[in-house]
Image (tube, rainbow, N blue to C red):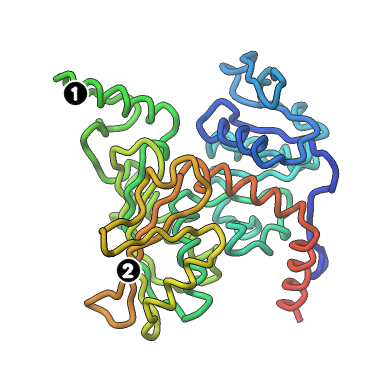
């Protein structure tokens, strides 16, 4: 590609494939395709062989789930993939070679230098630089960058320390079902025994169950570190994360401490976040009312609040947020990327940004 080339989707009804259609995120993708009137001309549902042959209803049609195969990508314009990293590594290159744009919700390609990692409200121009695959970031990263980006655009950011409170939905539909079932077990006086998560989440919490690394951080925490730097174009940003599973069915919460290179007035930050795309301010100090998971469950915005001065550091602010992990943290962000590729104005802005960067 030349410096000003951008890669958009054609402006016509599209052949869309959903890979991982039976999972929690796959189901949300189907809901959002209909809710947002995405220009679907043909919809193909793909999943593992064990799910093949099942039927799902979408937009008044009864569709049969097909097993994923090279032939299934023939004529497909865009693939919304949410079937796990190993599946994406196997099939995303096949789909891209067949001419589709793959928007992948797994971690398989996020840190590949040649694959854009995109949050449309933060770095939309990057989406147009794809070579067939665009990575959808980790759920906690998406939510956090929506709050960080408008602040970083105003004042240089030095350090971010975040603690997450992650719902069962981040581990999929089976984890959500298990939390409900084991909560009933506890209420009935029984002993909860988990088979999906390593420990029972019913009336309990535990540090995130992704693999621990040699440095003592788990994989989920390092995703937040590395992906945030890539999305925001701040490779030297100092970030530390602690990720925790909590007994909430759906929607993640985050407590973020943000240090800048100079003081950042609270009211200025509050105004920026209130006006930021994809963000909703929920804040009432007089009644101690701030964002809760129930405020955002099934909704698009990331709710922020309790924006306050860090008493220990004059250059730091504290921010609390909640966002629906399945929606903005996964399915919605993927569809917004596809919508971006259909937007002529966004394509023109991306071409201009690319040309300016290479000038």
Q: List the residue tagged with mark 1.
A: 187
- Does dot 1 land on a helix, a strand or a loop? helix
Contact between labelled residues 1 and 2, with CB atoms less than 8 Å apart: no
Question: Residue 308 at what x, y percent from top left?
Answer: 31, 71
For the question of whether residue 214 can be seen, the reply is no
User: Compared to 300, does 204 lie above or below?
Assistant: above
Quarter assignment of residue 349: bottom right
Q: Nearer the viewer, residue 213 or 72?
A: 72
Quarter assignment of residue 199: top left
Q: Give me the residue at 40% from left, 56% from top.
A: 222
Question: Residue 325 at what x, y percent from top left?
Answer: 46, 44
Q: Nearer the viewer, residue 74 or 34?
A: 34
- Residue 287 placement, left or right of 336: left
Q: Quadrant of the C terminus?
A: bottom right
Query: Mark 1, residues whose alpha carbon is within 10 Å: few (<14), some, or many (≥20)?
Result: few
Q: Give me the residue at 35% from left, 60% from top.
A: 320
Q: Nearer the viewer, residue 225 or 161?
A: 161
The numbered mark, 2 or 1, whose residue comes first in the sequence reads: 1
For the question of whether residue 112 can be seen, the reply is yes
> Which of the numbered marks, if any, corresponds to residue 318?
2
User: Compared to 335, does 156 lie above or below?
Assistant: below
Q: Give me the residue at 56% from left, 62% from top.
A: 277
User: Compared to 283, does 82 lie above or below?
Assistant: above
Q: CA distance from mark 2 to mark 1?
A: 36 Å
> Which of the numbered marks, if any, corresponds to residue 124?
none
Query: Mark 2, residues whose alpha carbon is within 10 Å: few (<14), some, or many (≥20)?
Result: many
């Amino acid at each position: 590609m030349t410096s000003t080339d951008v890669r958009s989707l054609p402006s016509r009804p599209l052949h869309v494939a959903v890979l991982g259609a039976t999972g929690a995120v796959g189901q949300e993708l189907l809901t959002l395709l209909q809710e947002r009137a995405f220009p679907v001309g043909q919809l193909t549902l793909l999943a593992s062989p064990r799910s093949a042959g099942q039927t799902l209803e979408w937009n008044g049609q009864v569709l049969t789930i097909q097993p994923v195969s090279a032939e299934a990508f023939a004529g497909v314009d865009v693939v919304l993939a949410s079937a796990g990293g190993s599946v994406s590594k196997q099939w995303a290159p096949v789909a891209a070679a067949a001419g589709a744009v793959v928007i992948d919700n797994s971690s398989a390609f996020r840190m590949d230098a040649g694959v854009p990692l995109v949050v449309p409200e933060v770095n939309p121009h990057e989406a147009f630089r794809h070579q067939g695959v665009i990575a959808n970031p980790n759920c906690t990263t998406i939510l956090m960058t929506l709050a960080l980006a408008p602040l970083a655009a105003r004042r240089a950011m030095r350090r971010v320390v975040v603690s997450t409170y992650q719902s069962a939905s981040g581990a999929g539909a089976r984890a959500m079902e298990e939390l409900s079932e084991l909560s009933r077990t506890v209420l009935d006086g029984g002993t909860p025994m988990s088979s999906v998560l390593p420990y029972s989440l019913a009336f309990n919490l535990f540090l995130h169950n992704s693999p621990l690394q040699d440095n003592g951080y788990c994989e989920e925490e390092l995703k937040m570190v590395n992906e945030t730097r890539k999305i925001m174009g701040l490779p030297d940003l100092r970030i530390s994360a602690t990720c925790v599973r909590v007994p909430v069915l759906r929607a993640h919460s985050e407590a973020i401490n943000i240090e800048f290179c100079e003081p950042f007035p609270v009211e200025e930050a509050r105004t920026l976040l209130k006006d930021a795309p994809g963000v909703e301010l929920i804040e009432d100090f007089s009644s101690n009312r701030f964002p809760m998971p129930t405020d955002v469950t099934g909704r698009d915005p990331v709710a922020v609040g309790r924006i306050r001065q860090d008493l220990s550091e004059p250059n730091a602010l504290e921010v609390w947020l909640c966002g629906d992990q399945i929606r903005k943290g996964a399915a919605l962000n993927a569809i917004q990327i596809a919508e971006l590729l259909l937007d002529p104005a966004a394509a023109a802005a991306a071409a201009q940004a690319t040309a300016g960067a290479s000038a």
